[in-house]
Image (tube, rainbow, N blue to C red):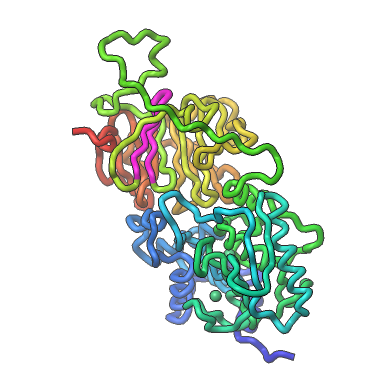
């Protein structure tokens, strides 16, 4: 029998103390230090990449980071360390950060394997299970992915594999030492060379194939998600939810949220291949002179430098900014090296106009809305099954056009603007918040009465109405400054 573990004892004490109780605020130095440590592990800005830079402007304190954590786990967002929050921090979990800082990030977004056969090798086994059981369990954990995406996995016994796997306690050569029994159970690296894809299991856990100890299949399936490029999900039923919870593994199939994530990266297995859109043709110069008849107008490129420029929609997509107008969009690259113009339909086939758009980074998808329906797109691909009706979000059927939409990552909410009101949608729970719709003027003071286009950029929200735009601090509910829509367009 193993000796009692401190983590377990603490967990048990917390459970007893908390059952049915109203949360109390924790103020001791020790608790605050523990929370600080947790936040710096899982919600930190260390290793800043394009994604976490977004947070820098808004997240400058313990309180703000704590709110982010509380929102992620669906706790009450108070910014105060209470017993409920501490209980969540003590749950056994994966060591991968929740606030994604892609280690191998490039501007194109999430890292993925650029081949279809991926090798793996187990260099150190656990004594808790026989080697053949470990082999079979890990193969099964990989198979739930190869069932749904066109990837195949091949175990090798020597040399360097794409995914190197080991069971090891404490320090094990990657500056992310394990913490003994409980706490962190395992971790994995995003796809890439070197340690990319490598998957480590904490040998201080008792690995099992049942509900006792820590179930190897469930943890491995989660970690292999990271090794293939998935990040943590806020969906509690998702495999990629960060904390461990045993469920029956018999006949296990990848949950929808994770399947959509991995298929967005690698495509769908053995069904019709998504059509690759042809490279967009260069756009002809706009016709000079006032010859625009009503039929010619939609195809004509609007003047991005007009002082009366009014956007239909705007959004960030993987660090680049997209502004929609008529049948065109402008893309402002993350290196600030100019603006390119495209016809919407040439990039996302079947979409001719966009009224509202937002990026949901947690799923690495973008939602484009026109009229009473919407599409989900991933890079240049429109995901299968779209368009779908806006009522999917819980918007009333009387809403047949959305003026603007923006996702506020800090609180995990998407705001849909319709005339002088907006609806607040909880992405993690997949449902509308209570108390909808809300008046723009009273709930978001400082931006006026209406919104034509909205986007989130580096921790701020930008609300356009007409040709003017307000830079907005959502946390403090305060306008920061006013600018012109054309200020983004590189015009003199
Ligand atoms: Zn994880
Ligand atoms: Zn490791």
State the residue at coordinates (44%, 49%): 108
Is 321 colored magenta in this rendering? yes
Is 185 colored magenta in this rendering? no
Range of magenta residues: 320-333
State the residue at coordinates (66%, 53%): 151
Q: Closer to the camera, 260 or 74?
A: 260
Locate residue 310 relative to residue 145 in the image: left or right: left
Q: Quadrant of the C terminus?
A: top left
Seen in the picture, residue 385 relative to 82 is either above or below; the reply is: above
Locate residue 483 relative to residue 439 in the image: left or right: left
State the residue at coordinates (56%, 34%): 375
The spot of residue 277 in percent (x, y) is 52, 33
The spot of residue 10 in percent (x, y) is 60, 81
Q: Which picture quadrant has residue 432? A: top right
Q: Quadrant of the N terminus?
A: bottom right
Question: Magenta stretch mostly in which secondary structure?
Answer: strand
Q: Quadrant of ligand 1?
A: bottom right
């Amino acid at each position: 029998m193993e000796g009692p573990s401190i983590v377990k004892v603490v967990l048990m004490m917390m459970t007893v103390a908390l059952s049915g109780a109203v949360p109390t605020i924790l103020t001791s130095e020790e608790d605050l230090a523990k929370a600080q440590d947790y936040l710096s592990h899982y919600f930190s800005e260390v290793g800043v990449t394009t994604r976490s830079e977004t947070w820098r402007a808004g997240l400058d304190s313990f309180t703000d980071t704590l709110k982010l954590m509380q929102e992620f786990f669906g706790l009450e967002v108070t910014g105060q360390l209470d017993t409920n929050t501490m209980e969540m921090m003590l749950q056994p979990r994966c060591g991968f950060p929740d606030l994604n800082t892609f280690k191998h990030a490039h501007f194109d977004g999430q890292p993925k394997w650029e081949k279809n056969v991926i090798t793996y090798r187990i260099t150190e086994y656990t004594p808790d299970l026989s080697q053949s059981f470990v082999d079979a369990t890990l193969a099964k954990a990989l198979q739930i992915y190869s069932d749904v995406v066109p990837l195949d996995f091949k175990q090798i016994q020597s040399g360097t594999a794409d995914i190197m796997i080991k069971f090891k306690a404490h320090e094990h050569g990657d500056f992310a030492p394990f913490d003994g029994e409980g706490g962190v159970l395992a971790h994995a690296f995003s796809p890439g060379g070197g340690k990319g894809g490598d998957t480590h299991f904490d040998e201080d856990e008792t690995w099992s194939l049942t509900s006792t100890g820590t179930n190897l299949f469930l943890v491995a399936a989660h970690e292999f998600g990271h090794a293939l490029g998935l990040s943590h999900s806020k969906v509690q039923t998702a495999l990629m939810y960060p904390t461990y919870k045993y469920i029956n593994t018999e006949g296990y199939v990848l949950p929808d949220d994770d399947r959509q994530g991995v298929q967005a990266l690698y495509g769908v297995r053995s069904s019709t291949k998504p059509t690759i859109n042809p490279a967009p043709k260069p756009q002809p110069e706009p016709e000079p002179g006032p010859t625009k008849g009503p039929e010619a107008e939609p195809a004509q490129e609007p003047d991005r430098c007009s002082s009366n420029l009014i956007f239909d929609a705007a959004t960030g997509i993987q660090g680049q900014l997209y502004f929609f107008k008529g049948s065109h969009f402008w893309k402002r690259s993350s290196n600030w090296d100019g603006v390119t113009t495209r016809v919407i339909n040439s990039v996302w086939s079947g979409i001719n106009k966009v009224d509202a758009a937002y990026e949901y980074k947690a799923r690495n998808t973008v939602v484009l809305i026109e009229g009473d329906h919407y599409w989900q797109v991933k890079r240049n691909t429109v995901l299968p099954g779209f368009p779908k009706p806006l009522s999917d979000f819980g918007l009333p059927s009387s809403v047949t056009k959305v003026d603007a939409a923006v996702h506020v990552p800090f609180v995990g909410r998407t705001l849909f603007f319709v005339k002088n009101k907006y609806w607040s949608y909880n992405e993690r729970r997949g449902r509308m918040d209570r108390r909808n719709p809300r008046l723009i003027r009273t709930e978001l003071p400082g931006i006026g009465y209406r919104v034509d286009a909205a986007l989130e950029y580096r921790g701020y929200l930008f609300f356009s109405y007409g040709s003017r735009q307000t830079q907005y601090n959502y946390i403090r509910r305060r306008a920061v400054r006013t600018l012109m829509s054309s200020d983004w367009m590189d015009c003199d």
